[in-house]
Amino acid sequence: PSAHRAMARQTPCARAIARSCAQAVVRAGGDAGASSSASSTSALAHAVKVASASSRFSTTTTVVGASAAGRAHANRRDVRAMMSPALASMRRTFASSGSYPPHEVIPFPSLSPTMTRGGIARWNKAEGDAVAVGDILAEVQTDKAVMEMESMEEGYLAKILVPSGDADDIPVGKAVCVMVDDPAHISAFKDYVASEDVDAADTQGASAPAEASAARAVLERPDYRSIKEQGVPLRNSRASGRNSGENDAHAAPVAQTLPADAPRMTVRDALNSAMSEEMARDEKVFIMGEEVGEYQGAYKITKGLLQKFGAERVRDTPITEAGFTGIGVGAAFMGLKPIVEFMTFNFSMQAIDHIVNSAAKTLYMSAGAISAPIVFRGPNGAAAGVGAQHSQCFAAWYMSIPGLKVLAPYDAEDARGLMKAAIRDPDPVVFLENELLYGQEFALPKEALDEDFTIPIGKAVVMKPGADVTLVAFSKMVGYCMQAAEQLREEGIDAEVINLRSLRPLDRNALASSVRKTNRMVVVEEGWPQCGVGAEISAVVNEDAFDYLDAPVERITGVDVPMPYAENLEKMALPTVEDIVRVAKRACYR
């Protein structure tokens, strides 16, 4: 239910660790005027160490003769109960009902997706007791576990409706107690009897919020209304005189045309400067990973950061991705802002449980209470001659995970702006770089050198406007599309090039807007074809702009095999500029 959530019982050791972490984070992020930089840095280091230790003492349950599957099942919260229509519209407030003063009836919670009944093993609060946020009201018992019912409100326990130990078949949703916000109202509930329907009886006086606050979770749901309901014309080819959509309000912004004297910067320096500026701006930001400190980074992305910020904030780790990623996620839960570097995203497979099951899902599973402001970064996709286990593109994997934000920069402007946005974002961000782009130099606008320059997450950019076909890509393939567009121009085809920048959230509006103008699309990626980025974009365009297509959406991907080691075979396994030109011409029936 919306007003309460069931929390697994923590061991005393885990509670002590959590308190220690919280105190350390407060010290690390406290008033700069009240503590020196050195003490803040020391406190930050302490928080990291404690978060590391806390990963060994995760939340536990008291299991009553359950199997391993049952124990895991008992740990999962029934989110659907929290999202019931009646409760989803409630504010957590005390409301009047009938002749009773303002109060809130607390229903029996659901602790797992299959739980329908349970019992109250023990009440931790007595009638008349004051209740603070986070206090344990009662211990709830099922056939699998004993778990705690935590209060989400401050108030007073006015009436216990279900005594402990009386029954173990209390149905989920049955009223178990009443809370009030004024101790003077406690006596009014001496003879209170709850209605069978908690939602109907006790939410009548609760006013629904005028407008729900915006959720940070990414929601990418297509419009399933019929074409007629959407108002999309059924016959709309350019031959019939359809508007070309040049003034589409949803179109992505067009990249600036830069002067000859524009500043230039490599992608490596752009990433390095962005992290350095953000670490100077916020003492909670630190970086950790293999060889990020003494060796200056495997690709020299972290060069000079150890000397500038010290070993407390540039932390070399052992070769143990599962270990240091878990430490980073724990530190993020406690309020720090880690940047976790993988030497290649192929190695993130060692840590994917922390990334997906912990970082990505905890905000939702905690009903919005626990954020994970963490960045996972490193090279993704093919490099050169490093074989199958170091060459895979994981863009499609991570962009399919709710709770993650996935970015893939192409040039120096992308690298600076997106890295800064990722570090400042309150949610976990997967930052997919490309090893072969690190040393490539790009011109960038002067405003991109500003310390507060960021690029919005979830927005694509048009690198080159066009009218005949849209080429969509991310990371290194954007450069290939730009080269292909130049060759197509020489053959009389005006190609538009879209740099996605953000894979999750995906800029669906930019894709649909471009197709409404060009009527054709080619998607280019290094990853495999099945369930790939191109497959998702093809589906999105079919959902959002099908009637504007004059040809099927085309995909250009890596070959559907593990990456070969031999140089000649590796070249054949990846898209080329010639592939893009050939397929774009095919889409234009040329």
Image (tube, grey):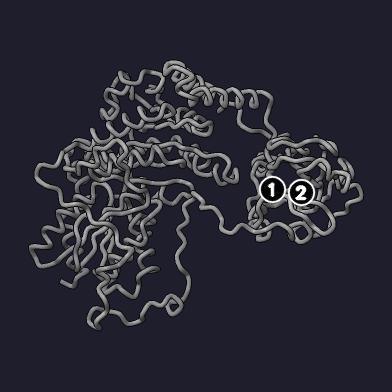
Q: Position of residue 344 (x, y in %)?
A: 33, 35
Q: Callout 2: 10 Å neighbours few (<14), some, many (20+)?
A: many
- Classify residue 369 by image quadrant: top right
Residue in front for this viewpoint, 269 or 546: 269
> What kind of residue is marked 1?
Ala
> What kind of residue is marked 2?
Ile
The residue at the point 49 percent across, 28 percent down is 327
The residue at the point 70 percent across, 34 percent down is 9
The residue at the point 10 percent across, 42 percent down is 261
Q: Position of residue 49 (x, y in %)?
A: 50, 21
| Residue contact between numbered discs 2 and 1, judged by CB atoms under 8 Å | yes
Q: Position of residue 281 (x, y in %)?
A: 37, 30
Q: Is residue 25 above or below residue 139?
A: above
Residue lying furthest right in this view? 191
Residue in front for this viewpoint, 336 or 381: 336
Name the secondary structure under disc 2: strand
The residue at the point 74 percent across, 61 percent down is 204
Q: CA distance from mark 2 to mark 1?
A: 8 Å
Disc number placed over residue 412 in the picture, else none: none
Can you see residue 322?
no
Q: Position of residue 372 (x, y in %)?
A: 49, 38
The residue where tag 1 is placed is 3
Would residue 232 be found to the left or right of residue 584 on screen? right
Q: Earlier in the sequence, mark 2 or mark 1?
A: 1
- Classify residue 481 by image quadrant: bottom left
Would residue 352 be found to the left or right of residue 234 on screen? right
Name the secondary structure under disc 1: loop
Q: Callout 1: 10 Å neighbours few (<14), some, many (20+)?
A: many
Can you see residue 163?
yes
The residue where tag 2 is placed is 106
